[in-house]
Image (cartoon, rainbow, N blue to C red):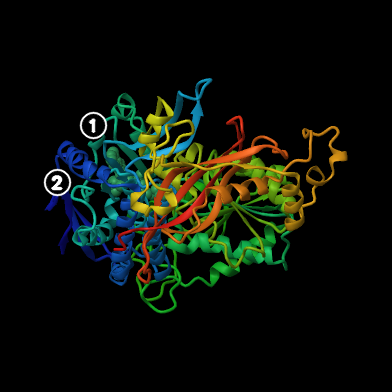
């Protein structure tokens, strides 16, 4: 039998002390054992902070993103070997797919997120804030990686996804991590972790693994650390209240269990596509991963007059769920993670039965294929009914973390919203309706109590990702009982690992700090026109000031004719009374087009193409007789990853186009995006 090892301080080492045997959830035979002690928590946290942290902080967001992508590709190539290991936790192929490929997919999604960050080790957030009359003193925000370690304490249900969805985010942010999987399924995490280390893709110290107990680790957290916890509300709350978390002001992201619900819209009567979708979704959420999903539907809230129809249809659907050894052909639902979970679910259902009736399933009997209920951790799906949800409490408080759901009736939509909110904060809910008024009323009424709401109908049915699936670029987490956490969530997730700092100074200084030209900053003389320079040779702040051009009436008339834009203010001088214009005004797009005529250096050179425009404003009317010039400044440079087939390597250069009149005042301002060739194409 395999002894699981911790990967701490840069090496694999077994723990010491009390041994725990981990068993196959299907057949009950031992698969591995771990030791709970023998680890110096302070030393491993310090190792992460002092070794992994500095290495990651030297890298830019783009380098870290490419590193995560390389890791995703490496693990993807090996994914098949994780399935047999996952089956031992009772997971079916579909359950394992969510864990393994969902987890690797999360790495890919976070790797792509690098493009939303600068090619710097730190992030520049938002826009500059004008802080003075003459524009020579401004403010901005930068966000730097925290100099501590991310401690991830994870639940047992998704041993791979649970780890990867979290480390993807801290690694992109530039923060190292210590991963603590839940003991019962830690052998799955350990298996993939061995590959992560063997790949050599991550810098030394970037990740560590603790398979033994983490009791006491929070005694050693420091102010720059971040703790994320996924698990039961009771453990989470106890850890969040740890004196050290409070005294060191350590961010604690809590993702706890919740009493998620799904609502059947009043319009979704039997015979509609939505009714069938609802039945399918509730059944899926009850049986996928044996209902051991934090986002699972625990409460199904349906129109009172449809309660019986739903009960019949759902019972029929559940009766088709074949249960047993996940590796036997045709089995749709496997085992729970272990006997302890079975006992836990039974005891929670017993509590729920004080307020409900069981209308499908059995607490003690289950029909199995290829497995034995004595040996494995099996339970049948159980459908309960509570007729009086508004006056009940247990159905809104007791989580049975297994294939269990309670049906409850509502009289009108306001009541459905009220019942949904009685969960006191959930990770997610869904409503199945083809009536967008119902959808809107529910979403607006229930959003305060939910981290995510899925609106499901025939239009999105084919492509929808399901009630229970958190997506890497959407926030996962919920208020109240769900813990108030915000895991993942695209850029929002990454920001949890960064420290925001307001920077004040001159635009010139802030240009250097942010690597983005700040309006009002000193110009740099590029020596030659910036269009003659290759990507590597351009410097933020490089500016060319063009020659000038006087606008004529015939320019305006000609542009109206060529563009067919005959808006009255450009064409009819008699119509200007009551407008802000005193004369026929030039088209904004003409001003911009003529600006290009002034700033473009036309000969063939490193600028390959112009592919767009951002943040364009026309700030002052342009009339015939005004004389305009352009200040063209390199604002920002962004890398582009070369594709294998690319002959020419390139980057994106954003130019600030500042069009000014004879008084020097800006009349139009825009950022143009150009693709610029690199001198070195390798
Ligand atoms: P749990 O018993 O609360 O344990 C969660 C994690 O905390 C495990 O890794 C556990 O390690 C660790 N832990 C327990 N006490 C600790 C302590 N004093 N110090 C440090 N670590 C400690 O939850 P679970 O049974 O694994 O997971 C099931 C629950 O998690 C369900 O209620 C489910 O709803 C919830 N869940 C929530 C989410 C979410 O995103 N919101 C996701 C999945 C699951 P050991 O295993 O070694 O005790």
- Disc number lying in front (1 or 2): 2
Task: Compare residues 633 and 206 and report the one nearer the observer.
Answer: 633
Q: Position of residue 571 (x, y in %)?
A: 81, 46
Can residue 279 be seen by looking at this rendering? yes
Task: Compare residues 268 and 169 and report the one nearer the observer.
Answer: 169
Task: Name which quarter of the figure residue 444 lies in.
Answer: top right
Alpha carbon distance from label 1 to label 2: 19 Å
Q: Is residue 520 left or right of residue 46?
A: right
Q: Is residue 158 left or right of residue 415?
A: left
**Residue density around tag 1, few if under 14, some if 14–19, many if 20 or more, within 10 Å:** few
Task: Compare residues 455 and 305 and report the one nearer the observer.
Answer: 455
Q: Position of residue 33 (x, y in %)?
A: 18, 57
Vertical side of 488 occupied by 3: above or below: below
Labelled disc at residue 219? 1
Task: Name which quarter of the figure residue 245 lies in.
Answer: top left
Which residue is tagged 2? Answer: 9
Q: Quadrant of the N terminus?
A: bottom left
Residue at coordinates 73% horizontally, 40% vertically from top-left?
Answer: 624
Vertical side of 507 occupied by 444: above or below: below
Can residue 392 be seen by looking at this rendering? no
**Which residue reaches farthest right?**
574
Q: Position of residue 585 (x, y in %)?
A: 75, 41
Q: Position of residue 512 (x, y in %)?
A: 36, 35
Q: Is mark 2 within 8 Å of ligand 1?
A: no
Residue at coordinates 45% horizontally, 42% vertically from top-left?
Answer: 635
Q: Is residue 315 left or right of residue 49?
A: right
Q: Classify mark 1: helix, strand or loop.
A: helix
Task: Compare residues 187 and 599 and report the one nearer the observer.
Answer: 599
**Residue density around tag 2, few if under 14, some if 14–19, many if 20 or more, within 10 Å:** many
């Amino acid at each position: 039998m395999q002894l699981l090892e911790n990967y701490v301080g840069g090496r694999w080492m077994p723990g010491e002390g009390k041994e725990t045997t981990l068993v196959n959830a299907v057949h009950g035979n031992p698969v591995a054992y771990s030791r709970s002690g023998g680890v110096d928590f302070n030393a491993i946290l310090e190792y992460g902070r002092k070794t992994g942290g500095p290495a990651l902080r030297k890298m830019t967001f783009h380098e870290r993103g490419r590193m995560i992508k390389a890791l995703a590709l490496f693990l993807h190539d090996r994914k098949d070997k994780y399935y047999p290991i996952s089956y031992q936790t009772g997971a079916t192929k579909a359950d394992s797919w969510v864990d393994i490929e969902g987890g690797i997919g999360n790495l890919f999604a976070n790797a792509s997120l690098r493009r939303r960050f600068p090619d710097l080790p730190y992030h520049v957030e938002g826009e500059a804030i004008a802080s003075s009359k003459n524009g020579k003193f401004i403010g901005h925000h930068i966000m730097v990686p925290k100099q501590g370690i991310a401690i991830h304490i994870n639940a047992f249900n998704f041993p791979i996804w649970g780890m990867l969805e979290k480390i993807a985010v801290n690694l992109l942010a530039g923060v190292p991590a210590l991963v603590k999987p839940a003991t019962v399924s830690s052998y799955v995490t350990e298996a993939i972790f061995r590959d992560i280390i063997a790949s050599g893709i991550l810098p030394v110290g970037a990740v560590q693994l603790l398979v033994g107990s983490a009791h006491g680790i929070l005694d050693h957290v420091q102010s720059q650390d971040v703790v994320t916890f996924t698990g039961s509300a009771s453990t989470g709350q106890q850890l969040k209240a740890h004196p050290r978390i409070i005294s060191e002001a350590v961010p604690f992201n809590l993702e706890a269990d919740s009493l998620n619900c799904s609502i059947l819209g009043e319009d979704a009567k039997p015979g509609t596509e939505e009714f069938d979708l609802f039945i399918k979704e509730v059944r899926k959420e009850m049986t996928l991963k044996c209902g051991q999903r934090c986002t699972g539907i625990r409460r199904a809230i349906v129109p009172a007059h449809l309660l019986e129809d739903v009960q019949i249809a759902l019972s029929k659907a559940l009766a088709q769920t074949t249960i047993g050894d996940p590796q036997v052909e045709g089995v749709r639902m496997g085992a729970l993670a272990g006997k302890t979970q079975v006992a836990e679910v039974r005891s929670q259902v017993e509590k729920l039965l004080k307020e409900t009736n069981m209308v499908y399933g059995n607490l003690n009997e289950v029909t199995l294929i290829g497995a034995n209920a004595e040996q494995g951790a099996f339970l049948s799906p159980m459908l309960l009914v509570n007729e009086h949800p508004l006056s009940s409490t247990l159905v809104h408080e007791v989580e049975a973390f297994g294939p269990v759901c309670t049906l409850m009736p509502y009289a009108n939509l306001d009541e459905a919203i009220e019942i949904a909110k009685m969960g006191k904060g959930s990770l997610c809910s869904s409503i199945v309706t083809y009536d967008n008024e119902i959808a809107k009323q529910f979403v607006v009424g229930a959003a305060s109590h939910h981290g995510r709401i899925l609106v499901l109908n025939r239009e999105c049915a084919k492509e929808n990702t399901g009630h229970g699936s958190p997506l890497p670029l959407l926030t996962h987490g919920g208020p109240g009982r769900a813990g108030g956490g915000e895991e993942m969530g695209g850029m929002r997730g990454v920001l949890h690992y960064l420290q925001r700092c307001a920077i004040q100074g001159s635009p010139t200084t802030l240009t250097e700090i942010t690597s983005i030209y700040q309006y009002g900053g000193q110009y740099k003389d590029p020596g030659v026109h910036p269009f003659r320079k290759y990507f590597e040779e351009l410097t933020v702040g490089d500016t060319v000031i063009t020659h000038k051009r006087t606008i004529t009436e015939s320019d305006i008339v000609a542009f109206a004719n060529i563009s067919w834009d005959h808006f009255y203010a450009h064409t009819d001088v008699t119509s200007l009374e009551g407008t802000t214009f005193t004369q026929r005004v030039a088209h904004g797009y003409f001003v911009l087009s003529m600006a290009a005529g002034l700033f473009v250096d036309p000969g063939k050179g490193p600028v390959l193409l112009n592919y767009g425009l951002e943040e364009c404003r026309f700030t002052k009317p342009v009339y015939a007789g005004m004389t305009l010039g352009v200040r063209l400044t390199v604002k920002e440079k962004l890398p582009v990853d070369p594709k294998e087939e690319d002959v020419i390597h390139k980057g994106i250069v954003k130019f600030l186009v500042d069009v000014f009149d004879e008084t020097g005042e800006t009349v139009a301002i825009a950022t143009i995006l150009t693709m610029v060739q690199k001198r070195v194409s390798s």
